[in-house]
Image (cartoon, rainbow, N blue to C red):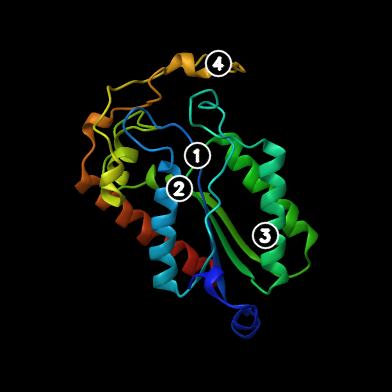
Amino acid sequence: MLLEEMTTEEIREKVNESSIAILPLGAIEEHGPHLPLSTDCLQPQYVAEVVSERLGAYLLPILKYGQCSSTKNFPGTITLRFETLRMMMEDILSELIRMGFRNIVVLSGHAGRTHMTALKLAGETVLEAHDEDINLMVLSDYDIAYTMNEIEIPVNDGHAGMIETSRVMAIRPDLVKGTAESNHPNFPPFMILKHPEKYFPTGVMGDPQLASKEFGEKANEVIIDRLVEMIQNMVK
């Protein structure tokens, strides 16, 4: 069910303590010379749509901006400040609780460490501010993808690499513009970098030449099945 297409009276009548809200998040961020800036939006949007249909959950409009650290200087990337993202998430979660949701899933297609930290910190803050029993899950679909046993992912695959290219091939093949050379950047440990892009000038971390639509379809299927199971366990 698309929350944005419902009326306020429908929300008042239908949302109760067993209702599930799913909020997808992404980023507008470079993904090499072959993938669109919306790559991190396409993946969670697709997963969230299928999962919400299976569970009868309420699907919120996707938030298409995030905090992008390593890609911040590439043309096309639009990054939010950590505080901005955290406060936005606090407000959205608080509003969902106000309208009656007690089961909330935040699914991010962007898995940057700072980005995910902002989301999780916002979740912790909101839970501490409410006395109600609330089930809140905050994750990236890549938290699932990189633990899959059903399919094998190359070592050091990452941003705009094999699995991400494959998943976009399966979701929006019309937006995939060829491929790109493999690249496995070696960032200096513990360094705060003003220009991280010099370590991966093509914007790729992995080998997109190994990608295939079939692999992407299988990966999406596994992620969806696993997320459905996780949510079902959460609301029990």
Work out whether mark 4 precedes mark 1 in sequence or the reverse, and give the earlier one.
1
**Circles 2 and 3 in contact, beta carbons < 8 Å:** no
* Image mark for residue 195: 4
Q: Residue at x 26, y 41 (%)?
A: 152
Work out whether mark 3 precedes mark 1 in sequence or the reverse, and give the earlier one.
1
Residue 37 percent across, percent down from the top left = 43, 37
**Circles 4 and 2 in contact, beta carbons < 8 Å:** no
> Given the image, on which type of amino acid does mark 3 rest?
Leu
Residue pointed to by mark 1: 28
Residue 58 percent across, percent down from the top left = 52, 70
* Image mark for residue 122: none
Work out whether mark 2 precedes mark 3 in sequence or the reverse, and give the earlier one.
2
Residue 191 lies in quadrant: top right
Q: Is residue 68 above or below residue 135?
A: above
> Given the image, on which type of amino acid does mark 1 rest?
Ile
Residue 163 lies in quadrant: top left
Foreground pick, 223 / 167: 167
Image side of residue 235 versus residue 82, left or right: left
Q: CA distance from mark 3 to mark 4?
A: 33 Å
Residue pointed to by mark 3: 93
* Image mark for residue 41: 2
Work out whether mark 1 precedes mark 2 in sequence or the reverse, and give the earlier one.
1
> Given the image, on which type of amino acid does mark 2 rest?
Cys
